Image (cartoon, rainbow, N blue to C red):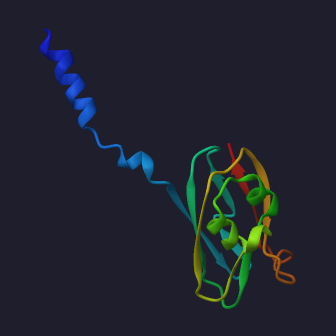
Amino acid sequence: MRIFPLALAALVLSVPVTAAETPARVTVTLANFSFTPADLHLHAGQTVTIHFVNEGSGGHDFTAPEFFAAAAMDAANRTRVEGGKGRVSLGKGESSDVTLTPKAGTYKVHCSHFGHSTLGMTGKVIVD
């Protein structure tokens, strides 16, 4: 009976912890007048890398100043969000990664290019 607790302890200690160190990764696709997903669901306090991809025929952006301002991120990632302006801008075919730790809340998202929001390029980031 004494061997069982020792064997269990050895098993627990042998499990690698690298999976917990790797941030979650989600992809947001920007296309002609849409975001996919339109509503991005994240977990508060859980570090995530958001992979932005522009598949549209021209430039688009992911503008969410309140979301980015509330999130914790390092200086390099803050620069990718246009120096802290709350916008990730991409030309046709471009992509960019932003790693951050979001704060709970619901945040509005839109494309700031003229008329794109009116044509449906809006969404939300929901962090719970």
Q: Position of residue 108 (x, y in %)?
A: 80, 59
Q: Position of residue 57 (x, y in %)?
A: 66, 91
| Observer able to see residue 42 | yes
Q: Give the camera-side residue of 8 and 28.
A: 8
Looking at the image, residue 122 lies above or below residue 58:
above
The residue located at (67%, 51%) in the rendering is 102
Looking at the image, residue 93 lies above or below residue 45:
below
The residue located at (80%, 69%) in the rendering is 85
- Give the side of residue 62 with respect to residue 117, left or right: left
Q: Quadrant of the N terminus?
A: top left
Q: Give the camera-side residue of 79 and 105.
A: 79
Q: Quadrant of the C terminus?
A: top right
The residue located at (87%, 76%) in the rendering is 118
- Give the side of residue 63 with respect to residue 49, left or right: right
Q: Give the camera-side residue of 34 and 58.
A: 58
- Give the side of residue 85 with respect to residue 18, left or right: right
Looking at the image, residue 27 lies above or below residue 19:
below
Q: Quadrant of residue 30?
A: bottom right
| Observer able to see residue 87 | no
Q: Quadrant of residue 88?
A: bottom right
